Image (cartoon, rainbow, N blue to C red):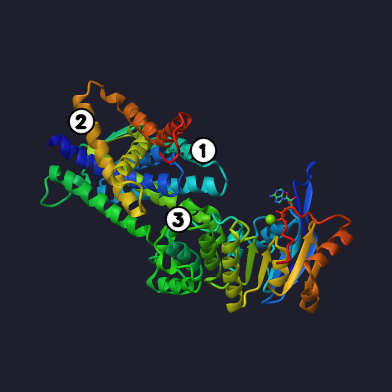
């Protein structure tokens, strides 16, 4: 039971990140490597502001920080025409120094004595708050992001990922659309980091290593359950995917003989296999044709 | 309406493969004119459209649209007043979005506020009306993803996207060339009706010479980045496909590259 509750709490908090990853990975159709940097940025800004006594302010501050990081990546990509993957890597690397400075030069910061949002809710014990707040934040972000992608600007962003030439021909500034999308995406990712820091009671920069793969795994698992349908379903499935991912990880840590530090490798393999599925299918198809089968078999 | 003055476009300038695609070209369009553009492969027809749309800047020359100098305006700004349909039906629409979303994207460019919901109810009624004029049954499939439509249906949607807010200039680049003959005719029919109904200033590239002579109000033949012939009115009415071919070969001392041009007189 504890296992399930823990994975629900973490699954929802990381689900906020999965929303952000869905935007870059599926809607813009570019994997955004800023993720690791912006998650850690959210984590460190939240920890720093919380330790100063402002746990609530820490959340919008972290979101703004993440959005700024996204804007930098978007700018590098659209204005300076740097390759999308490289733009993300550049921002991520730069953020490493920024994050260390935010945490006062050390890679981690403890919040045990600080007041976090989880201790602030009236009538709720800290333990209950650790369930209620993730539900609240995940649903709030999910609802807002679904609404956002039904607005004119949201529609433009979807179209940019679908057919950029056509959007440009419709007199819409594609660069601006992309930058806004990266801001929203990384803002969500940073918010997730910010909540995780307060939830765990400490910030550790290294916890963001490989976080992009975790997000991709969530998105892919979600799609395995819901299929690839509308954007709205996609966002819901990303959060559900995150929940399932956390539960699998919790079970694996508990029952498998693998030590905890092997889990990222397991996630990496899962993501690689899932992304390879189309290639596997095609290979199976050609193999069948070679054996003399027919296309419509 | 459109005024192109001494347009020069050189590709790969300063390299061994330097190539002049527009060679001091001048062209003036009156409001409401419907010009068909013909010319052999590589004559510079698409390059002319690209220059007008701002896909790249000219090496020399100026372009005016409705009195405004647009020579240095960025592409997406020009797109506010210039509509364009390409040969490739995949190019003008977003395949994973619905018909109404595609149309809304094009329609709201002039009106929408960034955070208003789209497509708006009012819009949808307008789209339904306009689509039903095409008699393709698209008005009942507004929530269908455009990627599921046939090439002709996609071109019809693209054409509506370009004209739902009447543009100052409509550019059609062999927009029926990739379609089967029956569908091509249907899309041409829609095109003519739309241009007429909104009195759009239009340029249409086609490789079908007889269609070029029978459609619109004026025909221009391009070759090697220049305008070879420019005819309208009575002169154009009397001209046949054969006349055009003859005029081309006497003036250029070579045969018109006819591997792609349709020479039949129908
Ligand atoms: N972006 C480009 N870069 C280099 N050469 C180009 C480019 N676009 C067109 N050209 C060249 O310019 C000439 C005219 O091309 P184009 O305008 O597409 O001809 P068409 O009349 O068939 O539409 C061709 O020789 C073509 O190879
Ligand atoms: Mg061409």
Expressed as whole percent of the image width and height from the top left, the position of residue A279 reads 44, 34
Identify the residue at image location x=30%, y=27%.
A263
User: Dot 1 corresponds to which residue?
Assistant: A86
Disc 2 C-beta below 8 A from ligand 1: no
Q: In front: A197, or B182? A: B182
User: Dot 3 corresponds to which residue?
Assistant: B148
Instruction: Assess disc 3: are there few (<14), some (14-19) or many (≥20) residues with their C-alpha within 10 Å of its C-alpha.
Output: few
Disc 3 C-beta below 8 A from ligand 2: no
Quadrant of the image occupied by residue A218: top left
User: Dot 2 corresponds to which residue?
Assistant: A251
Identify the residue at image location x=64%, y=65%.
B171
Identify the residue at image location x=47%, y=65%.
B103
Is residue A201 at least partly visible in the picture? no
Instruction: Assess disc 1: are there few (<14), some (14-19) or many (≥20) residues with their C-alpha within 10 Å of its C-alpha.
Output: some
Quadrant of the image occupied by residue A144: bottom left
Expressed as whole percent of the image width and height from the top left, the position of residue B117 reads 38, 66
User: Label 3 to label 2, Cα distance in Å?
Assistant: 42 Å
Disc 1 C-beta below 8 A from ligand 1: no
């Amino acid at each position: 039971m504890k296992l399930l509750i823990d994975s629900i709490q973490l699954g929802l908090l990381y689900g906020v990140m999965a929303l952000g990853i869905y935007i870059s990975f599926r809607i813009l159709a570019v994997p955004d490597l800023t993720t690791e940097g912006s998650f850690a940025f959210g984590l460190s800004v939240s920890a720093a502001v919380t330790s100063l006594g402002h746990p609530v302010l820490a959340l919008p501050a972290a979101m703004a920080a993440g959005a700024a990081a996204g804007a930098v990546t978007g700018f590098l990509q659209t204005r300076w025409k740097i390759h999308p993957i490289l733009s993300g890597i550049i921002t991520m690397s730069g953020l490493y120094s920024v994050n260390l400075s935010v945490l006062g030069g050390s890679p981690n910061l403890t919040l045990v004595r600080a007041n976090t949002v989880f201790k602030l809710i009236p009538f709720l014990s800290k333990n209950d708050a650790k369930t209620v707040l993730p539900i609240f934040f995940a649903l709030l972000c999910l609802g807002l992001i679904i609404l956002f992608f039904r607005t004119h600007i949201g529609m433009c962003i979807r179209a940019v990922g679908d057919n950029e030439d056509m959007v440009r021909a419709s007199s819409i500034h594609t660069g601006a659309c992309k930058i806004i999308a990266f801001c929203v995406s990384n803002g969500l990712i940073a918010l997730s980091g910010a909540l995780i820091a307060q939830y765990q009671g400490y910030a550790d920069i290294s916890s963001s290593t490989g976080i992009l793969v975790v997000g991709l795994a969530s998105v892919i698992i979600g799609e395995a359950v819901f299929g690839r349908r509308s954007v709205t379903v996609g966002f819901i499935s990303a959060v559900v995917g995150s929940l399932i991912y956390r539960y699998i990880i919790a079970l694996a840590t508990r029952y498998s003989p693998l030590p905890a530090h092997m889990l990222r490798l397991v996630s990496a393999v899962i993501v690689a296999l899932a992304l390879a599925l189309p290639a596997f299918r095609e290979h199976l198809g050609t193999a069948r044709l070679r054996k003399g089968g027919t296309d419509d078999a | 309406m459109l005024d192109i003055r001494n347009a020069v476009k050189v590709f790969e300038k300063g390299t061994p493969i330097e190539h002049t695609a527009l060679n001091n070209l001048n062209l003036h369009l009156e409001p409401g004119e419907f010009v068909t553009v013909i010319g052999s492969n590589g004559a510079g027809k698409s390059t002319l459209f690209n220059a007008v749309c701002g896909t790249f800047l000219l090496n020399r020359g100026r372009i005016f649209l409705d009195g405004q100098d647009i020579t240095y305006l960025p592409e997406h700004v020009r797109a506010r007043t210039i509509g364009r349909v390409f040969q490739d039906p995949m190019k003008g629409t977003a395949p994973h979005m619905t018909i109404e979303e595609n149309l809304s994207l094009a329609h709201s460019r002039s009106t929408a506020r960034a955070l208003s919901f789209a497509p708006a109810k009012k819009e949808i009624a307008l789209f339904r009306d306009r689509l039903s004029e095409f008699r393709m049954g698209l008005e009942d499939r507004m929530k269908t993803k455009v990627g599921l439509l046939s090439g002709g249906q996609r071109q019809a949607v693209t054409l509506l996207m370009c004209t739902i807010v009447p543009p100052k200039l409509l550019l059609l680049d062999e927009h029926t060339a990739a379609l089967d003959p029956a569908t091509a005719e249907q899309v041409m029919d829609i095109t003519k009706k739309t241009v007429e109904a909104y009195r759009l200033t239009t340029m249409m590239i086609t490789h079908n010479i007889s269609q070029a002579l029978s459609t619109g109000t004026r025909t221009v033949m391009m070759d090697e980045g220049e305008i070879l012939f420019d005819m309208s009115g009575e002169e154009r009415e009397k001209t046949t496909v054969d006349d055009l071919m003859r005029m081309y070969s006497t003036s250029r001392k070579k045969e018109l590259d006819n591997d792609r041009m349709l020479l039949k007189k129908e």
